[in-house]
Image (cartoon, coloured by chain):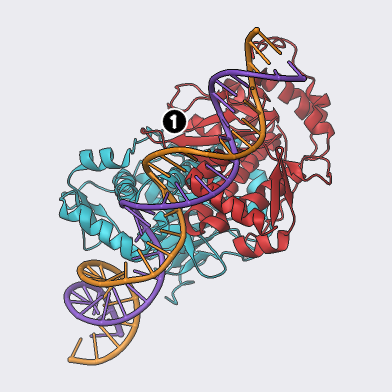
Chain colours: A cyan, B red, C orange, D purple
Amino acid sequence: MNNMQKDFKKLTDCSQCPLRLRGNHAANTPEEIEFIQDFKREERSVAAGAAILREHSTDGDIFTLREGWAFRYRTLPDGRRQILNFLLPGDFTGLQAELTQVMPYGVEALTPARVCIFRRENLWTLYQQFPKLGYDLTWLNATEELIVDENLLSVGRRTAPERVAMLLLHISKRAQAIEEPTSEGVYFPISQQHIADALGLSLVHTNKTLRRLESMGLHQIRNNRLKIFRADILKNLSAYHELPLRRKPLI
Amino acid sequence: MNNMQKDFKKLTDCSQCPLRLRGNHAANTPEEIEFIQDFKREERSVAAGAAILREHSTDGDIFTLREGWAFRYRTLPDGRRQILNFLLPGDFTGLQAELTQVMPYGVEALTPARVCIFRRENLWTLYQQFPKLGYDLTWLNATEELIVDENLLSVGRRTAPERVAMLLLHISKRAQAIEEPTSEGVYFPISQQHIADALGLSLVHTNKTLRRLESMGLHQIRNNRLKIFRADILKNLSAYHELPLRRKPLI
DNA sequence: CGATGATTTGACACCTTTCAAAATTAGTGG
DNA sequence: CCACTAATTTTGAAAGGTGTCAAATCATCG
């Protein structure tokens, strides 16, 4: 936990970025990568449960999640929390803070994570020197909004079972896109409390719904792994249609 | 209604754009405005209730709402509808469609409206030739996401009275930002069905909640006008904190 | 092997939805 | 400007999905 600065100066060579090498993202030119390298101010490791961005703080970083999972959330004064979306490796966020004085949302690590933090003051330079990267940023931001839209539809209009089914499918799909396929399902480091906060449900009711779907043989969650058995039924239940997305850019 | 093409060729001179002249938006250079002028493919008038963007269609425009109000929404196969956010004059949307083959959401006019539709094929040119406008687009998109975030928090974690209070305040604030202040409150062309769809509530319960707040003297809706009487109580009830936003760009 | 946190269960209250129908308001044609 | 119809807003009553409370069972970890 206190190794937060152990690798402070030594920034990974972006051209060797493990995310990039995995080939899930759109390619960049060497010049672009060089710029991104300079754009990067810091890499930071954060423990599971630790804050990456603090809600209501007056400064906020823009960053890419390089390893681990996290989530973006907002809270009400009395503590009620709504998870806006989950962040998986490769996801970029923090731009919205550009608009306000205080961070309207927080980001918290779900697992031990590692983030690449960029120089906000160079954001404008990025747009000027590499329009393509500016375009990519817009793209990344729009992708995030698409997910939030989907979540809003869920929370606003789907029943509890439908919401849970939807979340299982959505997370499963996203996880599959970034990890090697195994017969043991996908990594799933999300607790029931997190699911509840993401779906606008209570913990108890989330648990009961989850148990119900699982006992129907639709899926299984065990040891931080999610296996989908009956994607067909889950899809039908949640009316979830995967949007065919192009390959995401990486910054 | 069938005057949809009456002013087809004659595009407004963007430098004389009524929105721009009103001075609510960040300024642009003459060169930028000239580019925007060329970027604009068409202006279109749509009737209240008509579609501006069709959900699930395979083509989608990017546009700025110049006059009137509209809303962005998604539906489930059985017809349940969730309004994602309301669009007021000056709002820009449609970028997300860039990411998918099918429009993930629809946009419908709430009042007679007029939209400036841009040449999607020139979007990339915009980023290249006018990085500043690219930056603005990112900004506009991020602003929209901020609103969706707020709505997700509401729908997920606020009670019905809290949601309604929140919506009244939020809309009132946005409306005030674009119209002359009058003693008669702000323009409010939103039906209870729309409120229900935006808040994830049923029509009946929306009505009862609205009536309750109104009978408590917190607000009044009459003749498409909303008057807030007790902003203090409404704020306290909804835990709504206005985010101090910078002046929005206009494209 | 305690201790702390996560998951499960059961019971019950209650907020919200659904169903039905009346009362208003808005829109349209004569 | 008055009918007439459609749409919106209101109300009441009852059903039901979710939340809250409490407590037990499991799991994880130093």
Q: Residue at x 48, y 59 (%)?
A: B157
Q: Is residue B50 left or right of residue B7?
A: left
Q: Is residue A90 above or below residue B21?
A: below
Quarter of the image for residue D30 reads bottom left
Amino acid type at mark 1: Thr
Q: Is residue A39 above or below residue A3?
A: above
What residue would you read off at disc 1? B100
Decide if residue B220 is in sight here: yes
Q: Is residue B172 left or right of residue A72?
A: right
Q: Residue at x 36, y 33 (%)?
A: B78
Counting every numbered tag in the picture gives 1
Residue B9 position within the rendered picture, expressed as x and y whole percent measured from the top left = 71, 9
Q: Residue at x 64, y 40 (%)?
A: B140
Quarter of the image for residue B127 reads top right
Residue B149 position within the rendered picture, expressed as x and y whole percent measured from the top left = 54, 51
Local secondary structure at mark 1: loop
Residue A232 position within the rendered picture, expressed as x and y whole percent measured from the top left = 21, 38
Q: Residue at x 16, y 51 (%)?
A: A216
Decide if residue A31 is in sight here: no
Identify which residue, D10 or A42, lies in the foreground. D10
Residue B144 position within the rendered picture, expressed as x and y whole percent measured from the top left = 60, 43
Q: Is residue C6 above or below residue C22?
A: below
Q: Is residue A181 above or below residue A26?
A: below
Identify which residue, D17 or B69, lies in the foreground. D17
Which of the image's four quarters has the C terminus of chain B? Answer: top right
Identify which residue, C20 or B15, lies in the foreground. C20
Which of the image's four quarters has the N terminus of chain B? Answer: top right
